[in-house]
Image (tube, rainbow, N blue to C red):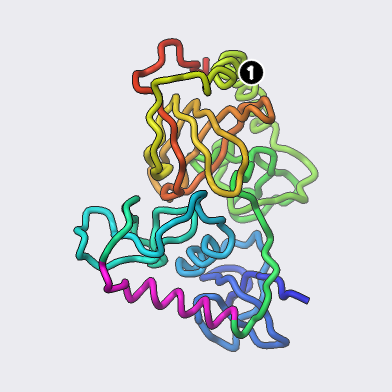
Amino acid sequence: MPLPLIRLSISPTNGTAHHGVMIGAQPLTVCVTHSTDLAPIAETTAHSLCQSCTRAWLILTTQPHPGGEPDLRPAIGTGKSAIAHRPIPGHLMGYCGKPLDARPTSARRVCANCSALAAALERFHRLAGEVSLLSVGSCPREEDLLWASSGRGNLVTGHRRHLASAMGLCKTPLSGPNPDATNECAPCRQEWRIERDRRDAALPRMRTRARWWHQRRELQTFHGRAADLNPGDAYTLSGCPDQHYVLTVTRPARGRRLAVLVYVLADDEIVELGIHHDRLLAIERPDTPEAGMPTLP
């Protein structure tokens, strides 16, 4: 039976957490961090996550970009002879965490940090065998998930999370998901109703726009990172069959995730999605800005 991929840490409440498995009583992390004091922890603790494990999680759970990807890419702003990096599937980001160019590279030298994480993952697979991964999908929707307030003093009341600020709609600092909450914060619920009304006002125009999209003749089509998205674009990404029509893009001051408000024709709904800054997308963009692009009231 496959071993479940879990979170491990030395401390049960804070510190650094790692992704890994338990082989009997022995912990094994994907990043080769080793300590006999490592033990399983819950998914909703206040730990910070090991950066190598974060990238390893993307490597293990993201499907490659449609049409294939080169084995190696150069870092942004480097020449053809610069050190090559191993790209994370479906991302313009190296195993080492550096942002990468969309073009392939002819360099023969490979980044030592990329090679180190690749070797760590190879060792992990060899020792752990088949691993059970909890799939979150390429378009995880967090809108309907309730979160716990920072400090986790009140686990009965859940808050709705604003993706761009990572705080509750009521401005409360949050610590992690709280799916077992029995009550919803009243100010969050009120703000959520206002947000739904704003989206409903823009829905008819976005619906019409999406249905006529494929009859456009003046479209730029290119492969780029999520950070390149503009309102009015449409995009697809690996692991999701739907095309996404972009209404707004919010770039947080901190973190590597964008908050993108999109219309999904298959669901006939406007939803907010969190997407990694370096996610590799197939983007379609009108040659000229569209007059009458829907806006939220």
Identify the element where label 1 is drawn: helix
Horizontal and vertical percent position of residue 134: 68, 60
**266 sits to left or right of 254:** right
Res 223 → quadrant: top left
Give the dominant element type of the magenta stretch: helix, strand or loop: helix
Magenta range: 107-125
Find the residue positioned furthest to the top.
Answer: 292
Name the amino acid, label 1. Asp
Residue placed most toward the observer, 223 or 154: 223
- Quarter of the figure with the N terminus: bottom right
The residue under label 1 is 200
Q: Residue at x 51, y 67 (%)?
A: 56
Determine if residue 198 is in view.
no
Q: Is residue 285 magenta?
A: no
Left or right, residue 73 beside residue 162: left
Rate crowding at label 1 as few (under 14), some (14 to 19) or many (20 or more) other CA atoms within 10 Å.
some
Q: Please tell me in which quadrant of the rendered image residue 124 appears.
A: bottom right
Report the label total.
1
Residue at horizontal 60 percent and vertical 55 percent from the top: 151
Q: Residue at x 37, y 38 (%)?
A: 228
Q: Nearer the viewer, residue 151 or 48?
A: 48
Q: Is residue 250 shown above or below 240?
A: above
